[in-house]
Image (tube, grey):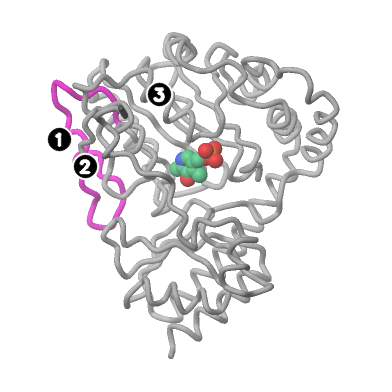
Amino acid sequence: MVRHVYPNLMPYTCSLADLPVEEMKQVLGKEQVYKLSFNENPLGPSPKAIEAMQQSLLQLNLYPSSNGEAVLNKIAEKEGVQPHNVILSNGADEMIILVAQTFLEPEDEAIIPEICFVQYLASTHLMGAKPVFSPMKEDLGIDLEGVLQKISEKTKVIFLCNPNNPTGTVIPSDELKAFIERVPENVLVVIDEAYHEFAEGDGYASSVEFVKDFANVFVIRTFSKIYSMAAARIGYGIGQAELVDAVNHVRPPFNVNSIAQAGALASLDDSEHVAESRRNNQIGKQLLCKTFEELGLSYLKSQANFVCVDTGRDGKEVFDRLAERGFIVRTLAGYGLTSSLRVSIGRQEEMEAFVAAFKEVIQN
Ligand SMILES: *Cc1c(COP(=O)(O)O)cnc(C)c1O
């Protein structure tokens, strides 16, 4: 009875690293668990957003704005585009699914870098389209030449992630522009900027600036990461009006609830909270990187809120020994990186505790 794509679809895993922190505590039998596996912002939402979300509860009997008009307007103003260039989704995850539903036919191919966010693959499979993996560079950056070489008559969508998850590396803006110029106009380039607000170097710039010149560029953002509203589920896409209109044909009405809309609106006004989150991230990232250097371990230079480190030994074993101590990180064996781990940046005191545990594990 199920569709023929069914064997390719997997329910979301519930391994230790994917559990809510309260369940992690139960599984590990510990009162204190440090969840460093989800790239969440440890500071929590802006106090202004919390207040707005609490207020919104009083009108939970009413349907929300079907398209999130007020949020669309505010994002458009902030990004220097028009409201018809913006569309909201139930988290960036839903936007990836909506893009796939809008553009991918079963005969189409979608190009996905080998070491990249897994939802692009799942959404491609959902539509019965064919995923085509492009190789990474030797330094694990996204190889745009490699992507270009995979373009065929059947290519419909290219998924990119910038900064990339799980590596944290960025594609410099000038390279990305030169790449987009070489991509055929009938191929959609999706650029997932979930970590945009954390990036501030290595030639990174948002691809929103390409939207006005390129009808085939679609940028995805989220309120789950720096805005710290992962549980509220709200993300958005930016593209030319025709693209946005096409996705709007597929988007369910009321896909973003009123709590999330209220929180997003207030979050966009709290630049101090964003700045504080960035500061916290820099401090934690510096401490992590310094520790990896002291231990002689190689890591990838990250423009996001996590760092990918090569532990030089079996990553699963290091994961288990960290878990025993109450620290949950992410293994990357699924990408063939059997000795690497991805560590999310927590609060300063969490990172200090992590570093002590990590040293103990690595040095013994
Ligand atoms: C976290 C993440 C998302 C999902 O964000 P939601 O808005 O919570 O669905 C999308 N893309 C990347 C690259 C991410 O890391």
Decide if residue 204 is in sight here: no
Where 324 falls versus 140 (above or below)? Answer: below
Q: Report, in whole angstroms, how far the alpha carbon at label 3 lies from the one at label 1.
A: 23 Å
Sooner in the amino-acid sequence: mark 3 or mark 1 = 3
Kindly report the distance in space between the C-alpha atoms of the residues bearing marks 2 and 3: 20 Å
**Residue tagged by mark 3?**
99
Q: Secondary structure at mark 2?
A: strand
Q: Kindly identify the amino acid type of the residue bearing the numbered disc 3.
A: Val
The residue that disc 2 covers is 134
Gap between marks 2 and 1 measured at Cα: 8 Å
Q: Position of residue 361 (x, y in %)?
A: 46, 83
Mark 1 highlights which residue? 149
Q: How far across and down, in percent of the image, does residue 110 sit?
A: 26, 30
Q: Quadrant of residue 327?
A: bottom right
Q: Are marks 2 and 1 in contact (CB under 8 Å)?
A: yes
Q: Position of residue 326 (x, y in %)?
A: 58, 74
User: Which quadrant holds residue 228?
Assistant: top right
Q: Which residues are magenta?
A: 133-158
- Residue 91 or 134: which is nearer the viewer? 91
Label 2 crowding class (10 Å Cα cut-off): few <14, some 14-19, many 20+? many
- Local secondary structure at mark 3: helix
Q: Residues within 10 Å of mark 3 (few under 14, many from 20)?
A: many
Marks 2 and 3: which is nearer the front? 3
